[in-house]
Amino acid sequence: MRCSQLRAVRIAAYLVVIALLGGASYLLHHSTVQAQTPSSTQLTVYTPQSYYTVPLLTLNGQAYVGLVELLEPLGTVDARPDGKKYKLKFTSPGARELEFQFQDGKDNGKVKGDKIKLPSIFAIQNNRGYVPLVSVSEVLSRALSTQIRLSLNARRLFIGNIGERFTLDLRKGEPSKLFVSFDSQVNPTIATEPGHIRFTFRREPVISGVDYTAFTDPLITGANFSEHDGVAELDVTGTSALMANFADGGKTIIVTGAPAPPPPPVAQLPIPQPNVPAPTAQPPKAPAGPRFLVLIDPAHGGSEIGSAISPTLPEKDVVLTLARKLQHELQSRGIAAGLLRNGDIAITLDQRAISANAARPAIYVALHAANSGKGVHVFTALLPAESVSARDFLPWETVQTAYLDLSASVAGSVSAELEARKLPNATLAAPLRPMNNIAAPAIAIEIASPSGDVNDIASPAYLDQVAQSIAAGIAAMRGKIPEVRP
Amino acid sequence: MTRPIVVMFLVLLLIAAGLGFYAYHLKAKVAADEQRLAQQSQMVVPPAAGPTTLVTLYVASDEEGGLRRSQINVALPQERSERARAVLRSLLSTYLQPGSTHPIGAGSDVRDVFLLGSDTAVVDTNAGFADSHPSGVLAEELTIASVVSTLNANDPQITRVKILVDGKERDTLAGHADLRRFYLASGIGQVLKDTQ
């Protein structure tokens, strides 16, 4: 071969190698996309009735939100991925069923039969449909006949004409006081550090038309409002340590100077009840009174899906739906109820126990769902019965021992209510974590299909009946279970 | 470019395409093999040789939510821990049969049973036992209860049982039942036998 021919062959060989490397790189990239995991960011959604959080998935550098996770708390959802096509039927209470149609990898779809163009492609991951976060306002406004407002950078979504505004009223004196007034009760988390007191609002749709307000006062110098990571934050600045008190039934926060000695550098003070005064060194006030709080723990979450009820229905989703229904049922009976998990997040068993014990509930209820068996099983902790008191120092593994009698009473009460609604049920002791570590009367509920057909497990009517039974069983125990001081 | 060079280029391109197709085919084949292996029911069979002994099994039933006592003849070794292992393998084989009342994952097996003193057994299961076990409070409790009750029924001296997975302690069996603790035969088994 001539020299020029040899050079040409070499070039051809290089081209082939480049083609091969390109192919390998494509395959690698393809598998990497499959293996992408959800990021830790969340979208906080506010509706006129409640608030909830939805995990965000990052795909190709963009935030995506799951349609099922977004719509499920707003009504009944029936999602059917079919290969690359994705159909979702949604019915909000009192409204007609409407349909969403999208296709994996395409940026156009249909909502209620009308075409919609997404700013980037629709994605299906693990049989779940995801739309770009930036398109959520448009997608929802096509589906819901109400105002939708997305605060994109703050990861906050407002459904309906909602928004909790506040006023700032500085009353000068010795010391000066800043009155932060809201239209309704608020329950922020408070953090203090020298010269700052920060109120973080996660549950309330707090908004403001003004970002920064400056004051000409020797103590309180300004108030800065910001939204980020699904929360709203009001940072009041001062020339010395500040403290807060609640007034007007939790509708007003009064910020003033903290007496010496100054507080520790940083203190996170989650406030369970808005009318509880912040710690103060002034003449001692009556401590917060005991209250009856039911803490609901929807099991699993995040990558830990629990049992696969069906190929498209994980246990984590069923129990979250049931938990929200149970919370509503309890609240409608005048019982305070909180969720340990109100989004698709993973929490370890020990973290669950630690959070539950820190909340000091009157009753702890863990929720599970199974793809085998039938009916509802009510569990108490499987521990040897011993005569111990809640005041005794107990090992972490057997803390529940002191509450076994009360737990059994709650289980019996719930079982009686299930029986009254003709729901097949049984009460058992189980070695279920983290029940052993709970320092309160604790039960776990595991629902299975009422009929033997696993598809019936998520039927709204069935979940409603179960939630009503549990709530009625707990309500019947009120007065027999001691209230707990927060 | 001369004709031989074009031909050579095309041949190399063809080889590249062929290699690409072969790689794709291999990938699909590996995926199919993995799926087939996962679905393959690997039966655990106790040793068949030697004289047989009547063994009591507490077999779980998902439908009834309890344990059912049954007896079968099994050839058992002489050594105590080996006997315990053979009994448990018989129990697991019933769960691996088609139409089982309490199906567990294919390939589930007991690697070893260690006896600590006279009353404590440590059961070392293989990873497949826990990894493919159906997830659920009752389903997991039934498995543990049947293991503990069966061991106690065939060797009444065994009253405490701990379950390991692949030689290691694990938090839960399949997300629910606690595997960090020792189970008392008078505790967990009794709870579920009472439901019969």
Image: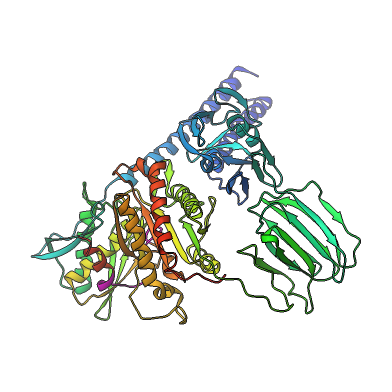
Q: Nearer the viewer, residue A236 or A280?
A: A280
Figure check: B188 above or below A113: below
* Residue positioned 42% across, 66% down in the render: A442
Magenta stretch containing residue A173, yes or no? Answer: no
| Residue A428: image location, x then y, percent | 31, 63
Q: Nearer the viewer, residue A13 or B33?
A: B33
Magenta stretch containing residue B175, yes or no? Answer: yes
Q: Nearer the viewer, residue A92 or A240?
A: A92
The colour scheme applied to this rendered structure is rainbow
* Residue positioned 22% across, 67% down in the render: B149
Question: Quick one: quadrant of the N terminus of chain A?
Answer: top right
* Residue positioned 81% across, 62% down in the render: A178
User: Is A419 placed left or right of A276 in the picture?
Assistant: left
User: Is A159 placed left or right of B171 in the picture?
Assistant: right
The span shown in magenta is B173-187
Question: Quick one: quadrant of the C terminus of chain A?
Answer: bottom right
| Residue A143: image location, x then y, percent | 58, 31
